[in-house]
Amino acid sequence: MQQYLTIRAPITGTVLADGNLDLREGDLIEPNASQPTALMTIANLQQLVANVKIRQEDIQFVEAGKSVSFRSKQDKLDPYPAEVHAIGKEVTTDQETKKRVIPVQVIVDNPQGEDRLRPGGTGYAKIHSQDMFLYQRLGQELVRLLPARLFPSGNMNDKQNPSES
């Protein structure tokens, strides 16, 4: 005897992974448990979240609500409109580049849930900030290129009292 069960999700979206319920035959599924059983993954493909790493020295140019152009790695030509949603509070070290970065959450608009942009993919984000004179930009890049020993220590963990110098 075959029975059918209607499963309702708490959000509107698209099923991302095949939920092979036959493999769960006989399993007890408790929706109100502290750790409910996940049957399948559902996402809103109209708006996706991109977790972007911003170099510590560039965070001054990033604000919530700023416009962003997002390009996926597989489709570099067509940018997707996006916006800075949240800026992380902690500086971490990026494992690939070994640079100090701050996580920034960007909401990417994906019109009609296009198949070209998918959860879990990677890409490039350009956050649009204020205009800057060329000499300001060159000065900023020069500071990045020169060895850190040429500049006074800027470590936030140093608790040196200026009157003790």
Image: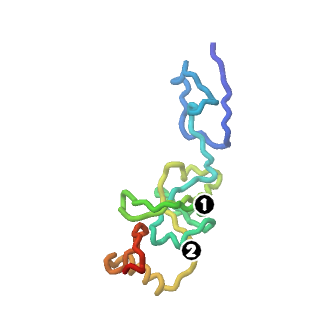
| Secondary structure type for disc 2 | loop
User: What residue is pinned by disc 1?
Assistant: 85
Q: Amino acid at mark 1?
A: His
Percent position of residue 138, x then y = 43, 83
Q: Is 96 displayed left or right of 38 in the figure?
A: left
Question: Can residue 81 be seen?
Answer: no
Which image quarter holds the N terminus?
top right
| Secondary structure type for disc 1 | strand
Q: Where 43 sits versus 133, above or below?
A: above
Q: Is 97 displayed left or right of 68 in the figure?
A: left
Q: Residue furthest top?
A: 1
User: What residue is pinned by disc 2?
Assistant: 129
Which image quarter holds the C terminus?
bottom left
Residue in the image at 60% along x and 68% along y: 66
Q: Amino acid at mark 2?
A: Ser
Residue in the image at 38% along x and 76% along y: 144
Q: Which of 158 and 119 lies nearest the eye of the viewer?
A: 158
State the image quarter where residue 11 is shown: top right
Q: Where 154 sits versus 134, above or below?
A: above
Percent position of residue 95, x then y = 37, 57
Percent position of residue 145, x then y = 35, 77
Classed neighbour count for the residue bearing mark 1: other residues with Cα under 10 Å, few (<14), some (14–19), many (≥20): some
Percent position of residue 8, x then y = 68, 33
